[in-house]
Image (spheres, rainbow, N blue to C red):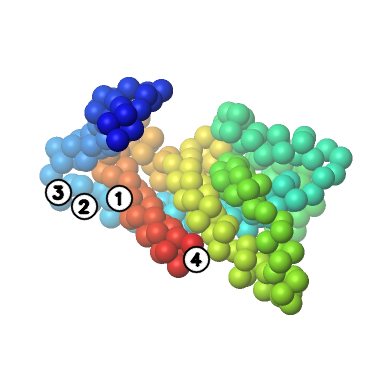
Amino acid sequence: MFRSLKRNHVLPGFGLSLGFTMFYISFLVILPVSMIFINSADAPWSKIWQTISEPRVVASYQLSIGASLLAAVINVVFGVLIAWVLVRYRFPGGRIIDGLVDLPFALPTAIAGIALTTLYTENGWIGQFLGFKVAFTPLGITIALTFIGLPFVVRTVQPVLQNLDKEIEEASASLGANRLQTFVKVLFPELLPAALTGFALAFARALGEYGSVVFIAGNMPMRTEITPLLIMTKLEQYDYAGATAIAAVMLIFSFILLFVINLLQWWTNRKFI
């Protein structure tokens, strides 16, 4: 028993590892986030409320949050489908497509924004064939956010599918279940936690996105102006209290949404696993 407690580990002891972990997280995450609320507290509450409740700012909240949610939902649906095709099928060019999934990770966001704007303007390669306007509209913003969030869902769901034994599906079919029943009763419970994680990552990435959106948005106040752009505008005007106040609202909403998603993950783990 004494020897079992003295097992050698690759990393140092629990106390030292935990201390370094807490210091690293505090220095890189907790401290910068805390400064947002500290800087906001320097201004009078009346000015903070006036800043965060301004109609132009509220409209940017609605656009940023709504477009991010819609893009995350789209990415969950098609991200799971893409992950399924990449894992379960072998076809020419499959590895190339698998590598292209990570392109939004490596591509600078400004370049992505310029490329999407060029494609979807009225004279663009794709926009000229559409009967409606995409660039400089909320639809264009949603497309840009979908583009940058797709890899999060695919790379989160893909390992789950790779570890999912095909014999489970064969057993379900042998017991008389059709394809829909197999997906709902067998595959869906296994994929749901990973899909929720991918949704949370895609949403969080989209909520704070700036570079790929600012070009295709057009930045028209009350219509296509996103919250990160307003924060940058406040900073350029040296209104640090106003910028941090708007950022604090977005941060609080992100915390609430991520907390709800974590609750859903906990509930699904208890219900299906």
- Residue at (77% x, 35% y) in the render: 96
Which tag, 1 or 2, sits closer to the chain's start? 2
Which tag, 4 or 3, sits closer to the chain's start? 3
Horizontal and vertical percent for residue 223? 49, 54
Residue toward you, 36 or 257: 257
Between marks 4 and 3, how big is the CA–CA gap? 46 Å
Which tag, 4 or 2, sits closer to the chain's start? 2
Residue beneath label 2, please?
A: 49
Q: Residues within 10 Å of mark 2 (few under 14, many from 20)?
A: few
Q: Is residue 170 left or right of residue 254?
A: right
Could you tell me which secondary element the residue under label 2 belongs to?
helix
Quick check: 9 above or below 119? above
Could you tell me which secondary element the residue under label 3 belongs to?
helix
Residue 45 is tagged as: 3
- Residue at (74% x, 70% y) in the render: 173
Which tag, 3 or 1, sits closer to the chain's start? 3
Q: Quadrant of the N terminus?
A: top left
Residue 252 is tagged as: 1
Q: Is residue 26 left or right of residue 115?
A: left
Q: Residues within 10 Å of mark 4 (few under 14, many from 20)?
A: few
Q: Are marks 3 and 2 in contact (CB under 8 Å)?
A: yes
Q: Are marks 3 and 1 in contact (CB under 8 Å)?
A: no
Q: Amino acid at mark 2?
A: Trp
Asked where in the image residue 44 lies, by quadrant, the reply is: top left
Horizontal and vertical percent for residue 97? 75, 39
| Res 226 visible | no
- Residue at (71% x, 63% y) in the render: 169
Q: Amino acid at mark 4?
A: Phe
Residue beneath label 4, please?
A: 272
Could you tell me which secondary element the residue under label 1 belongs to?
helix
Could you tell me which secondary element the residue under label 4 belongs to?
helix
